Amino acid sequence: MVENQHLSERAKQDLELVEAARLGKQSAYADLMDRYRDSIYFMMLKMVRNADDADDLTIEAFGKAFSRLDQYSPSFAFSTWLYKIASNNSIDFIRKKRIQVTSMDSGYTNDDGERIQIDARSNTMNPEETVIYGQKVVHMRMLVSKLKPRYRVLVEKRYFDELSYEEIAEELQLPLGTVKAQLFRARDFLANMMEKTKDSI
């Protein structure tokens, strides 16, 4: 491990956790999240200025980092690599948001100084959209029911019962980091299942 002598003590501890995670040790993932969750969250919050978005981006950052652990090189600290992933993810999120219409309610001022009000589309779905939406909800619930019980319960509580991460952690008596990590994994499984079954919707 001569090449890692430049790393700080904390970075060397991170490297041990990364190597344990690569070997499939679940507690190593939770330990890495516990070490950096708060600092990543506050970095995201500074960038997007919205607590819910910052929360989701924090989970996404860890999810992306954990799925790419084989790409991490100890030539630099894990924290540096993680912050880079989180920062790039947040920048992508901000770019996508800017593409969307900035404000449906307030409208915007054109080059001639005129106030242009945007006609927002009605939120009411027509009969065909209602049927399609109903089919998608049924399909989604069917996919969720196929998840392992521990993932299914988390998804149902977060997305069907609309509980916060903290409420889920308290109700299930689980560490907050575990709830977030497992929810990310559950979303990953669902995304793969939806991709495989998209033609049936």
Image (tube, helix red, strand yellow):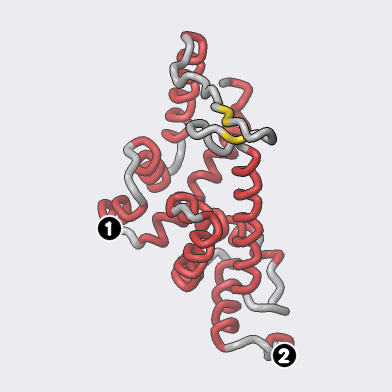
Say above or below: 4 vs 159. Answer: below
Classify mark 2: residues with Cα within 10 Å, few (<14), some (14-19) or many (20+).
few
Which label belongs to residue 173?
1
Say above or below: 116 vs 162. Answer: above
Does residue 167 appear to the left or right of 38 in the view shown? Answer: left
Residue pictured at 57% horizontal, 31% vertical = 115
Amino acid tagged 1: Gln
Q: Which residue is labeled 2 in the image?
A: 2
Residue pictured at 27% horizontal, 56% vertical = 170
Q: Earlier in the sequence, mark 1 or mark 2?
A: 2
Does residue 44 appear to the left or right of 151 in the view shown? Answer: right
Classify mark 1: residues with Cα within 10 Å, few (<14), some (14-19) or many (20+).
few
Q: Does dot 2 land on a helix, a strand or a loop?
A: helix
Q: Position of residue 179 (x, y in %)?
A: 39, 55
Q: Nearer the viewer, residue 91 or 159?
A: 91
Q: Position of residue 158 (x, y in %)?
A: 37, 43
Q: Position of residue 154 (x, y in %)?
A: 38, 46
Residue pictured at 51% horizontal, 44% vertical = 187
Name which quarter of the figure residue 157 lies in. Answer: top left
How many circles with numbers are drawn on the protein?
A: 2
Q: Nearer the viewer, residue 103 or 110?
A: 110
Instruction: Give the position of the N terminus as an image quadrant.
Output: bottom right
Q: Does dot 1 land on a helix, a strand or a loop?
A: loop
